[in-house]
Image (cartoon, rainbow, N blue to C red):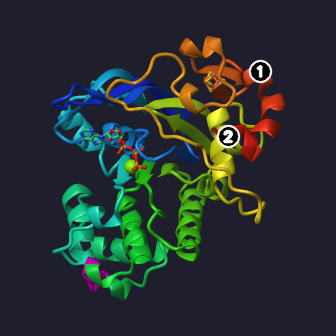
Amino acid sequence: MDALLDVRDLAVHYRTAAGPVRAVDGASFTVPAAGIVGLVGESGCGKSTLGRALMGVLPRAASIAAGSAVFEGRDLVTLAPAERRKLLWRRLAFVPQTAMNALDPVQRLSAQMQEVLVERGGLSRAAAGTRAAALFAMVGLEAGRLRDWPHQFSGGMRQRASIALALALNPALLIADEPVTALDVIVQRQILDVMRDLQARLGLAMILVTHDVAVVAYACDRVVVMYAGRVVESGPVRAVLEAPLHPYTMGLMNAFPDLERAGGELVPIEGAPPSLLNPPGGCRFAARCPFAEARCAQDPALVEHAPDHQVACWRAPEAPALRPLASEAATWAR
Ligand SMILES: Nc1ncnc2c1ncn2[C@@H]1O[C@H](COP(=O)(O)OP(=O)(O)OP(=O)(O)O)[C@@H](O)[C@H]1O
Ligand code: SF4
Ligand SMILES: [Mg+2]
């Protein structure tokens, strides 16, 4: 696989009074040059921190403690800030977790577009106007709405505008953090359809951060499953969702309504992820895993179990036998 982005053992820590919070703690995955990669996991597992680390927009209390993230042949971790800034918008673009954060509330959309297209992209004001209208059309917004302020937009429209803004300078990789989370299901689908359409038309790569497996199933080509700061499973969406190898992935699938399996029983994963202040040794999922054994006290490495399908679980070879058990509520009951 030709990787556009190759993340290896990335660790990102927040400095706190109680000690470092290991929000990302040895995450590895690749993103191909085209297609949508879903980055999925429960709240607090480090998805946004990972996205922000790649973009170089971490809060001041956070820093990259280890690892590499090679994007188009250059390591984003060691790249000089000035060099990294050159990549932002042009090669690497970001839609932060709430669309309102991507938009400046005190500027009309047209002014925000002009700022990116003229100041960063070097377009003339006239060319920027034409390009802004084309970008709005691409995401299904009328050009006339460019005159509006962000607060005049619905949530779905703000998300469309944020995506249009992020794509202004034709980036090779777009990282969209929870782009559909606060929206109702109909609008979710519309936004996901826009993202899929843009991916196909422009041929770029996207990382779609979400806590919802149904969103991954609907919109993504590949999936990276995170748990407690680590990647526990990754691979093509069909392979991972149809035949998950990690018990956490199996549990996540049970916990979300499946569009095709409507009416199926939703089985929550009992308990909560461990604290990332002092994460436990061994497999981080062990305290919640119905299949934990003595050997799970040792940390399972992320290994390629099948071609292009990675997993970090000692019992992955037994996955075909564990899957039917994992689909039963009784297996997860404490
Ligand atoms: N500024 C901060 N200081 C200390 N810890 C933080 C800070 N920001 C985030 N964290 C911690 O880092 C971990 C990862 O947070 P992050 O926001 O990356 O998770 P997430 O997977 O994006 O969650 P969500 O689905 O809720 O958006 C969490 O345990 C969180 O409490
Ligand atoms: S390594 Fe053990 S505890 Fe961890 S997910 Fe696999 S079976 Fe469960
Ligand atoms: Mg987040």
Vertical order, 237 against 108 (above or below): above
Which is the main secondary structure of the residues drawn in magenta? helix
The type of residue carrying mark 2 is Trp
Q: Is 73 one of the magenta-colored residues?
A: no
Q: Name the residue rendered at 65%, 42% in the picture.
A: 251
Residue 317 tag number: 1
- For the C terminus, the quadrant is top right
Marks 2 & 1, CB-CB < 8 Å contact? no
Q: Is 147 one of the magenta-colored residues?
A: yes
Vertical order, 91 against 79 (above or below): below
Picture coordinates of residue 176 (x, y %)?
A: 43, 54
The quarter holding residue 234 reads: top right
Residue at disc 1, CB closer than 8 Å to ligand 2? no
Q: Nearer the viewer, mark 2 or mark 1?
A: 2
- Part of the protein shown in magenta: 146-150
Residue 332 tag number: 2
Foreground residue among 146 and 170: 146
Picture coordinates of residue 180 (x, y %)?
A: 48, 64
The quarter holding residue 143 reads: bottom left
Q: Residues within 10 Å of mark 1 (few under 14, many from 20)?
A: few
Q: Name the residue rendered at 38%, 23% in the picture.
A: 68
- For the N terminus, the quadrant is top right
Asked if residue 229 lies left or right of residue 263, the reply is: left
Picture coordinates of residue 114 (x, y %)?
A: 23, 69
Vertical order, 198 against 176 (above or below): below
The type of residue carrying mark 1 is Pro
